Amino acid sequence: MNFLFVNYPSWLHAQIFPGIKFLGALRWYGLMYVFAFLTAYLILKKQSKEGALDTESYKANDDDIFSFIATGILFLLIGARIFSTLVYDTSGFYWKRPWLIFWPFQNGRFTGLAGMSYHGGFIGGFIGMLVWCKIHKHSFWKWCDVMAVAIPLGYTFGRLGNFCNGELFGRITSAPWGMVFPDAERFSASIPWVQEFAEKIGMDISNMNLVNFPRHPSQLYEAFFEGIVLFLILWFSRKHKKFDGQLSVMYTGGYGLFRFVIEYFREPDADLGFRIAKDANAPIYQNTSLLNISTGQILCFIMILASLVTGIVLFILNKKKSANKD
């Protein structure tokens, strides 16, 4: 290991048991989803025991908690998959073959549902929780608040799954914790800026034709800030909320803000590039301007704006409700 950058662990593979015929389809990403959902369920159940879901006429039970989170997860997966295939996939393949969106096989091999979108999952999960609360006649915002606290720590596992897959890495960096990901884009060693950057980070490229530069491990940034940090903020705020829905808007705005900033370090999808760009020819592997905005940042800005508007509306409604009681 060179002290100016880190190599991606050679022992880490997308498959849990690489090379074993019958277990080759088992992937860390899928296992991380199991950990994520289990973690969210346990945190939700913990809050229920604290009475976060109880009212004067109702006490939450395990069956309701399980069916609530199961419904949310089902809609989350549907939304995440649809968004990934119809919004982020620009090839048009799934628009022409929508019946393959949820087909877990490719070329006769089981691949699972490779490709999920967070923002699609957010919308799907939101709809799922709303539908469940309407059917069971429970307060949507009360239940949504409990879920908002449970989600971030589970989300951490999702991003760790991306790291294990060696995907969704960041832009090139000279930071000492920059990591060389095996599947990242390589650059010709004859290009002047490549030679200058290699010298800057102490990388010997004299015997290379193509150079793989270290990248920001943006999956780990997201796992920490959008997962652990956001969870801690919400966890310690849960007993101090002023109105139902407060934790939900805190989660939405907090995630949107953290993700918006981290997107400056994460490389956008090559087929999408920048949705808004100061320079139309700006490379996606470098951060040349804060005015180069990705798809993820646009969606995160919408999340931030929606959380502010919703928070203000809920605050006003709660204030009026309290005034009427008095």
Image: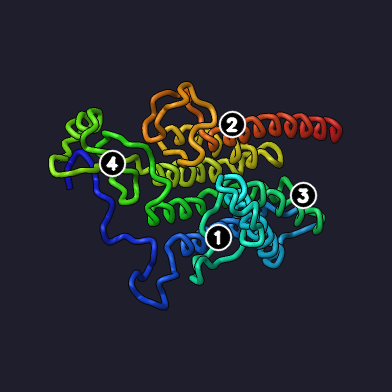
From where the camera sits, is residue 50 visible?
A: no
Identify which amino acid the numbered label 1 is placed on: Phe
Give the mark nearer the N terminus: 4 vs 2. 4
Q: How many marks?
A: 4
**What distance separates the C-alpha of mark 2 from that of mark 1?**
26 Å
Give the mark nearer the N terminus: 3 vs 2. 3
Which of 289/30 is in front? 289
* Residue 301: mark in rendering: 2
Please state which of the two labelled residues, at mark 4 or mark 2, is closer to the viewer: 4
Marks 2 and 1 in Cβ contact (< 8 Å)? no
Lateral position of residue 44 relative to residue 137, left or right = left
**What distance separates the C-alpha of mark 4 from that of mark 2?**
28 Å
Q: How crowded is mark 1: few (under 14 residues within 10 Å), some or many (20 or more)?
A: many
Identify which amino acid the numbered label 4 is placed on: Pro
Q: Mark 4 points at which residue?
A: 214
Q: Name the residue under label 1.
A: 37
Q: Give the SS element for disc 4.
A: loop
* Residue 139: mark in rendering: 3
